[in-house]
Image (cartoon, rainbow, N blue to C red):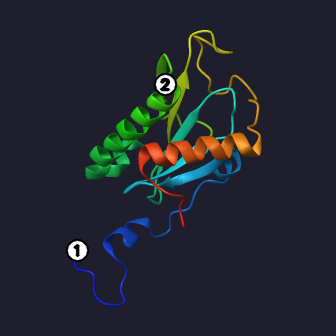
Amino acid sequence: MLALPGSLSEVEMSEAGWSLHPQLAADTVPVGDLALSRVLAMNDADFPWLILVPRRAGVSELIDLGAEQAQLMDEIALVSRALKDETGCDKLNVAAIGNVVSQLHIHVVARRRGDLLWPRPVWGASAGRHYENHEIARFVASMQRRIGISAPR
């Protein structure tokens, strides 16, 4: 696609009309933006938990991304490696469920044998303990360094 002076770039056009679902905004803290996805930290101090949200309007399923599916998979792998390296977890839970929030978003949750819910899934099982401000700030900064991103603009 040709970007004319004063026109929207290809990336801006594909992001046109995108906004973060209010429930995701309420439950998370922004970490940063990758080429396709906004990375968020879930405000649940019991489970180190990141969420990737492709910045594409009207996308509710992975198959809706078309050719960008591969980009999302690369970003999931990058974020998963960073979270595993940061936490030393026993297992990563990676899922796109979307029954409550239909906007496509991918959960990446670090799990440890013996955690509060092991081996059950975390989704919908616990109200969660919110991070203290200094704890979430430290987690977000660590993830930004490991992923190589800064806070979204």
Instruction: Kindly give the residue lying farthest to the left in the view shown.
Output: 2
Q: Residue 72, percent across and down? A: 35, 45
Residue assigned mark 1: 1
* Residue in front for this viewpoint, 30 or 82: 82
Q: Residue 93, percent across and down? A: 49, 24
Number of the front mark, 1 or 2: 2
* Residue in front for this viewpoint, 100 or 151: 151
Residue occupying image coordinates x 43% and y 36%: 82
Up-down relation of residue 152 to residue 109 (above or below): below
Q: Is residue 94 left or right of residue 70?
A: right
Residue assigned mark 2: 93
Residue 103 seen in the current view: no
Distance from the alpha carbon under mark 1 to that under mark 2: 37 Å
Up-down relation of residue 14 to residue 69 (above or below): below
Q: Residue 61, percent across and down? A: 43, 43
Q: Amino acid at mark 1?
A: Met
